[in-house]
Each structure stands twice: as structure tokens, then as C-alpha cells.
Amino acid sequence: MTTKPGEYKGTGDYIASADLQNIVNVAVALGRPLLIKGEPGTGKTLLAKSIADSLGLQLIIWNIKSTTKAQEGLYVYDTVQRLYDSQFGGCDVADIKQYIKLGKLGEAFAADKPVVLLIDEIDKADLEFPNDLLWELDIMNFYIPETKETIAAQNRPIVIITSNAEKELPDAFLRRCIFHYIEFPDKAMMRQIIAVHHPDLDQILLGQALEMFYTLRALNDLQKRPSTSELLDWVQALALGGVKPDKIATAIPLLGVLIKKDQDFATVLDQLHQKGSGDKAPTPYGVHNR
Ligand SMILES: Nc1ncnc2c1ncn2[C@@H]1O[C@H](COP(=O)(O)OP(=O)(O)OP(=O)(O)O)[C@@H](O)[C@H]1O
Ligand SMILES: [Mg+2]
């Protein structure tokens, strides 16, 4: 079956649920930014790459830090370089255009073809950041007073915004976005995700690893539950370490690949010992890997 141009259906290296595929296509059709939330490691960042690959579009990534300002996404006027050139010569400093550097949003607007713009981890920036972007994301253009130029999107970019919900986003911003929460994958979907990354994995080993992984995730009081990316690392480590599948039922080999917080080690051993009976209870095998 071939994918119609412009319709997102996931990619060979990214498993997208039917809901996720639908919402991507709705956001593209409506020309609205798609805001993606979900636990760490649930494929939020990778989604944008998958959309770009699937639709054959360039991907522009804007990684947001706590210090990022909205203006940097539009353009930066390099006054320091201009001052330097005015003192030491070499360039025509009257030509201000050469000191204007477009930011990621500016690049996306100026592109001559539609692009996918990923604004990754928007919640890292301060609260003003999303509000400051509202206007430009709405009207898809901005004005550069220094050069008296307007940068207008020739093609509306597909804007994917991710958030780990560290901060609540302003209502006015949310109103303009389409929202999707990536649910943590169930076992069947997780098998597909693992198959993408490790197609040759022993299926019995994988079955046991999945059982233990979902048991760990269901434990109460974990400060940081292991996520997809940790499971991917763990199954690879188990395979590389030649761990026998039956070991996983009675112990948790290489636990440090899954569990990253000191307190969680204790919680895991405590709760699994309580759950297990007699000598079937998991032992702290692998805990020395801390
Ligand atoms: N649906 C999926 N299909 C294929 N691989 C996936 C999928 N979901 C997660 N992964 C894998 O899990 C890892 C984490 O993915 P990604 O970095 O996109 O997660 P994230 O949600 O952005 O995490 P964070 O919140 O920590 O930034 C990657 O190695 C990715 O390949
Ligand atoms: Mg991410």
C-alpha cells in the first residue's frame, strides 16, 4: 500500500499509533501547530523526524533551553560583528543585511518549500516564551526593522512542539495548538518499537524482559519509572551480555540500565521481594552496577 502524498502514516523506524497518525494529519490539514506531550522517552522528539521523512520534507530543529528567547527564533542582528568590521574594515558596514541571521522560525518561513519545524521542549523556556511566539505562529510572518524587510512564510511550515510538562503553557498558546498526549506504549506496541531498533533479538529473552519491565513500571513509589529508551538500552545490554531469559524471572540483571535513582533501587528490591514468594523472589543481581 502506498502512502498518498501529504498523508502521514508513520515510518519504518517510527511506530505511530492510529490516533497519533490521525492527529498529525489533522494538524497538517488545519495548518495548526501540534503540541505533543508524554512521558520522557515516548518518541516525542523523534515524531518530527518521522513526519519529515514520511512527507519528504526538510526538518528544522529548534532546541529550547531555559535561556532561549522567542526573538532568537526570528532573527539576530549581529551588532558586535558590525562594530568589529567598522573598526577593522574589510566589509561594507552600511549593508546591514549581512549582519542579520535568521533563527529557526525565520529559516522555516524563508524556506522555498514547506518544512517541518520542531520546537523541542518548549516548557524549558520561561513562561513568556510561548506567548511571545503566538503572533508570529498565527500570521506566519515577521518584520525586520533594521532592514525594513518582512519575512513571510511562502509555505506554512508543519510545526511540531514538544513539552515534558515541566511548566504549564499559557491558555492563549494552547488555544492555537492541536494537542496530543502520547500514551505509554502497551506490550504489543512496545514489541513493534523494539523490533524497529533490534530486529534480531531472541524472542524468549524479549518476552521475559518485557514482563519484568512492565512489572517494574507498575511498582508504586518509583521516582523515575523506566521508559522506552531505557528498555531499548536494557534489551540490547541483555543480548550483548549473553543473559539467559530465565535469569530475568529470578533476578534483574543490569538493573542500572533501567533504574537511574538510588532510592528507586531500594524500592524495586523491596517491592519485588514482597511480591515474590520464597526463593522465586528476584535477587539484587545486577544492583552492584550502580
Ligand atoms: N514510537 C516509536 N518508534 C520507534 N522508536 C521509538 C518510539 N518511541 C520511542 N522510541 C525510541 O525511544 C527513544 C526516545 O525517543 P525520543 O527521544 O523521541 O523521546 P522523547 O519523548 O522526546 O523523550 P524526552 O522527553 O526525554 O525528550 C529513541 O531512541 C527512539 O528511537
Ligand atoms: Mg525529546
Image (cartoon, rainbow, N blue to C red):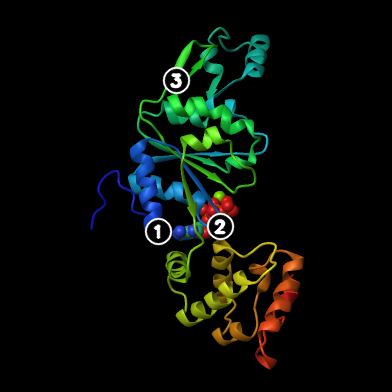
* Secondary element at image label 1: loop
Q: Nearer the viewer, mark 1 or mark 2?
A: 1
Q: Which residue is mark 2?
A: 41
Q: Nearer the viewer, mark 1 or mark 3?
A: 1
Q: Position of residue 146 (x, y in %)?
A: 55, 11
Q: Position of residue 274 (x, y in %)?
A: 70, 83
Quadrant showing the N terminus: bottom left
- Whether ligand 1 has any atom under 8 Å from the Cβ at mark 2 is answered as yes
Q: Residue at x 47, y 79 (%)?
A: 202
Specify the amino acid type for callout 2.
Gly
Specify the amino acid type for callout 1.
Ser
Residue in front for this viewpoint, 286 or 27: 27
Residue in front for this viewpoint, 212 or 243: 212
Category of crowding for the residue at label 1, using alpha-carbon neighbours closer than 10 angstroms: few (below 14), some (14–19), many (at least 20): some
Q: Which residue is mark 3?
A: 151
* Secondary element at image label 3: strand
- Side of 278 relative to 150 (left or right): right
Q: Position of residue 132 (x, y in %)?
A: 57, 27
Query: Mark 1 and mark 2: span between their CA atoms?
Result: 15 Å
Label whose residue precedes the other's in the sequence (1 or 3): 1
Q: Which residue is mark 1?
A: 17
- Side of 38 relative to 275 (left or right): left
